[in-house]
Image (tube, helix red, strand yellow):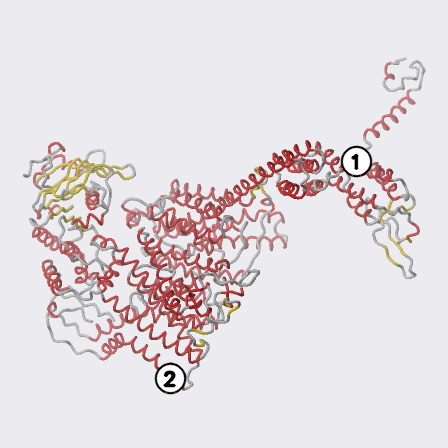
Amino acid sequence: MRTDHYKVFVHPTLAPSTRIPLLYRILVFVLIACSGMSAFAAETMPGDADTRIRQQLVILATPDLALDAYKAAFAALVDTEDVRLNAILEDYKTRSLAILNGEPVLIPTVITAADETKLALPLDPLTREPVSKEPLPLSAYVAHYASRNEMVLAKKTLMLLRFADPDPDKRLQAVNRAGDGVDATAREGLERRKPHETDRRILRAIEESLAFQDLGGTDDALRIAAANRLADLKSERAAVRLAHYLEAKPQLSAEVAQTMRQARARLESWGTIAAGLKHLFSGLSLGSILIIMALGLSIIFGLMGVINMAHGEMMMIGAYSMWAVQQLLGAAITRGWLPAGLMEWSLIISIPAAFVMAGAVGWLVEALVIRWLYGRPLDTLLATVGVSYVLVQAVRMIAGDSNAVSSPTWLQGGWEVLPSVILPYNRLFIIVLCAGIVVGMHLLLNRTKMGLLLRATTQNRVTAQTLGVRTRRVDGMTFALGCGIAGMAGCALTLTDILKPDMGSSYIIESFMVVVAGGVGKLAGAVLAGLGLGFFNKLLEPAFAAVWAKVWMIAAVIILLQWRPSGLFPAKGRLADT
Amino acid sequence: MTPAVAHSPTELYQPSGMDLIQLEKVEVVFDGFKALDISYFGVDRNELRVVIGPNGAGKTTMCDVISGKTKPTRGRVTFDDTDITTWKDTDISALGVGRKFQTPSMFDSLTVFENMELALPGRRGVLRNLLQRKAAPADRDLILDQLERVRLHEVAFNEARSLSHGQRQWLEISMLMIAKPKLLLVDEPAAGLTDHETAMTAELLNSLKGQHTILVIEHDMEFVRMLDSRVTVLCEGRVLADGSLDQVQADPHVIEAYLGRGKNS
Amino acid sequence: MSRKPASAISVHPMPPVHPLVLSHRLISHWGMWVFFVVILIGAPTALHFGWTDITSVNKLGRYLAIALVALGLDLVWGYAGILSLCQMLFFTFGGYCIGMHICMHGPLTQGVPQALAVVSSNVNGPVLPWFWKPFDSATFSLFAVLVIPGLVAFLFGWLAFRSRVRGVYFSIITQALTYIAVNIFYLNELKLCGTNGLTNLESLLGFNIRAPTVKVGLFMTTVVVLAGAYAAARWLISTRTGRVLIAVRDSEMRLRFAGYQPVAYKTFIFTVGALLGAIGGALYVPQNGIITPAKMLPIESILIVVMVALGGRGTLSGSIIGSLVVSYLYSWLTSKAPAVWPFFLGGLFIAVTIGFPRGLVGAWRSLGAWLHRTTTPPKSTTPGLPVKSEAPS
């Protein structure tokens, strides 16, 4: 007899020498294993969880129980952390929870029959399927008329459940609300949730709300600690809360009041820094657009001696190409030719499309208008003004006066670099795109053959011609290049600006300011001036109205010109006179 | 006073106080490239001096430095015993330096007569000139005389833009002359002229010899020969040689500079 | 005015002048004056006989006020070569000066002109800002029409020209200037009635500006002022200063080396142009009944440039002719086919700049030269005598 095999499975009180048949032992093993496993996995097996929820719901709907019984039922429900309970508890609050034949049901709608009897169709609380085919009279149901205490409990339960909601936005909302009152349950829920929470943002909110709870309490030491904690967290909400406490509750002890004041001061100074950083970032993104526009203008003016007042319209055409791409994609998707997911890529597709479209229009303009005006910059200024009016009206006739463009979802939201400093992804995209364009331009002009032909033609046309360069073609390409760049800027601009036929006019003047300030000698001029003016504009904006910021900007440019008449990086040497 | 052909700065004559214009240790650097590197250069009063040199030798740059259009990075420029190194070009021109540019620049929409009238000295204020409609008779005669010297009196009342290239050169020179400058800088006066016009231009400049100080920059050797004056040769920004045209043309260094060395042409 | 002294030309018998050439010359010399006299006398006469209505006369009066601006631009751009894209800024400033005076004598709410009271957000009722008060006086207002825009032009021009801002850069900056001015005037905080502008103007110097007789009077005043300005401009161009201005355009560098101060001349003519614009504005506003900051938008000043370009830059008469042509075309096209106007305007710009740089008056003069050439047998007594350019009109 092999007794050692049985030792593990058989109850120790049974004599090991008792001979039990093998089959019986196996059966016992299986049964115990199953029950053990089920006891182990009781919480993860859905069926069981559902039963437990139903059990608690029955308790809740049972009338005239002690408040503690209801409390226990609610607590048990909280432990389940089941999302469906949100809806069920809302129904509980509207007194729609009842018992039918020992099972919990929801009766959200009550109908009055022809004979004045009230009927209701019972729904299963978890599946929301009707339990019976016909609505049953109210007398068939048993329900507990929830008193105020129970309602409060239900609300608390909902709140605690929301702490565990899979949707992070809902969780955040619940956590933030938990900081509003001084509530032990809320506190308990927050403490309970803290170790499980993985989202950094929500963790911070939990800390915040806990600190708020402490702040509203009576223990001075805790309040001081909480105030300091909030200042450390750089909590935005705390500044307001602290102000409220300082003004509304004069019975604070001096120490507490002083700590609160200090904390508030720290938070306010952080707020200023955060706002400043945000403005700096806006300045950077505005500056990027200006740089791109100025780059195109610089290329066209610096290399060709042509003032392109229609540059803003080239940008507008690039923006509208985004619209056109989305229209085309939309039509193709509804017809089933292309998968729906492609719309997300509309921005990526539009950027080269914008370059091509704006470039093509630019090439046309050069061939029809500009070529007759070389050497006469003032005349090019006038003629391109005419071109700009034609373009605006043409686009207005084709696309109408106001159009909508949807941003891709992967660019929504922002990157929270520091507390309260959120850098929107779409602006980041613009900055990255612009940086890419600058680098690309530099490489194109200085490292490629086309760039070489371009520079050669503009520096000495006749010699270039004698060397076999097709200067007419180079002219067209140069202008198209400048316009294409503007088109790409326009495409990126759809992420932050409204699409209108005359959207170009608000950027053209600032872009020219950049060219004037930066000088047309080098790329660096456009970059520096663009950044400078972008920052200048955005930094002044909070202090003055947007218009005054522009005034100071122009004044700054004029003053700069006093010191450097041809911009920061003027073209030097013999050619500067031409 | 004319020395034998000199090769190095130390062999050039020492500055005498009589030089109207002097460049001492003047250097001009453009973006790392040394366009001018002159140890000493001076032009006597009432002398007609010709400066020649291969392309890119720095002749026009030297003119720019004298007229104040370009500031030297180092060195000193003295005009009529006044240090003008840091002066503005308009101030230098007010001192009496007249410059004729390579491409004739005049007022195309105005008539030849009106061009000359504006070049007359005096009366520069806006409001004073509002009171002036026609030129005074004395001035008119002066202008017409001057125009006659350059054979332009017959076209005096035509627009300046209708003149031929040669006529434009003469008009520009006349406009400078009528302002009675102390130093006249003439940058390639024979450029684009016919042989006949070239000869006439040489005649014009020779007629001014001894009455004005003139510095001529030129390429055309025939023209230079017609001027029959002292010649300075510039090469790569430095003074290479100095003397009469025959002396300079015989100098092996100069020949090498013009015909090129082996490695760079 | 002849520019040829007898001593310089070899005398030879004058060939008989063809009647066409003669009539061309007559029109060139006297055309503008005849035009002024005709409309000065003709318009009220036509009105009296019922051949035209007061609206048309008023319209012409307004367009003539704008022609003053164009005249100023021709001096600044056509002669001195400075492309200013902010002439309407001075026009609007002058208009506002007169407008504010008219407002002060119009319906008041608690001492504040209605146009301003309407946009006031003061809880206790509108308050009259300090800078409005002087405009109560007619003398001050008339002075202000000249002084304020003049001062702005002088300071801005001097600053810009002094820093040797190159031609194209200057144009861009003027455009930025006018764009900003619009936005500043739009601000309600400035107490200049914001986007509404000065509205419901009623009486000037005791005259009800809506009465037909007053309108005719204003019309005639405008004609006289324009004629006077035209005469003054002709005189200015004939002086030495005028020639220096042309020289500034042709070769500023040469002029500087000749010892002139181009900055002084440019500032001078820029201010003159601004003054003409301001006077135009002051004449326009009583005839128009309203002035808004929108008149300072870049497009308005660019329209003036088209006017001068179409008429012929550097001709003075061209600016007036061009401005009337463009104004009437604008009014006709925007009522008939408003969607077409931008195409037309744009096309006009392009066409005039590329193919028609001398403008209408320039074409007229070329016609005169052609007539002269074809009707005069080629008989030159002195070999090599170049063809004479035609006399300016």
Please determine whether, in this image, residue C124 is positioned above or below residue A167.
below
In the rendered image, residue B165, in percent from the top left (x then y), is placed at: 18, 56
In the rendered image, residue C304, in percent from the top left (x then y), is placed at: 38, 65
Q: Is residue B221 left or right of residue C96?
A: left
Tell me what residue is drawn at x 46 percent, y 54 percent: A314
Could you tell me the amino acid type at mark 2?
Thr
Tell me what residue is drawn at x 20 percent, y 65 percent: B132
Look at the image and tell me whether residue B17 can be seen: yes
Of circles 1 and 2, which is in front?
A: 2
Name the residue that disc number 1 marks: A79
- The quadrant of the picture occupied by the C terminus of chain B is top left
* Along the viewing direction, whichever of A421 and A300 lies nearer the viewer: A421
Q: Is residue C243 left or right of residue A270?
A: left
Occupied quadrant, residue B31: top left
Dot 2 falls on which chain? C
Please determine whether, in this image, residue A361 is positioned above or below residue A162.
below
Could you say whether the residue bearing mark 2 is in a helix, strand or loop? helix
- The quadrant of the picture occupied by the N terminus of chain B is top left
Please determine whether, in this image, residue A348 is positioned above or below residue C292.
above
Dot 1 falls on which chain? A
Occupied quadrant, residue A213: top right
Q: Give the alpha-carbon distance from disc 1 to disc 2, as whole Å.
A: 99 Å
Could you say whether the residue bearing mark 1 is in a helix, strand or loop? helix
* Residue sticking out furthest to the bottom: C49
Could you tell me the amino acid type at mark 1?
Asp
Residue C45: mark in rendering = 2
In the rendered image, residue A115, in percent from the top left (x then y), is placed at: 92, 61
* Along the viewing direction, whichever of A408 and A270 lies nearer the viewer: A270
Label 2: few (<14), some (14–19) or many (≥20) C-alpha neighbours in 10 Å: few
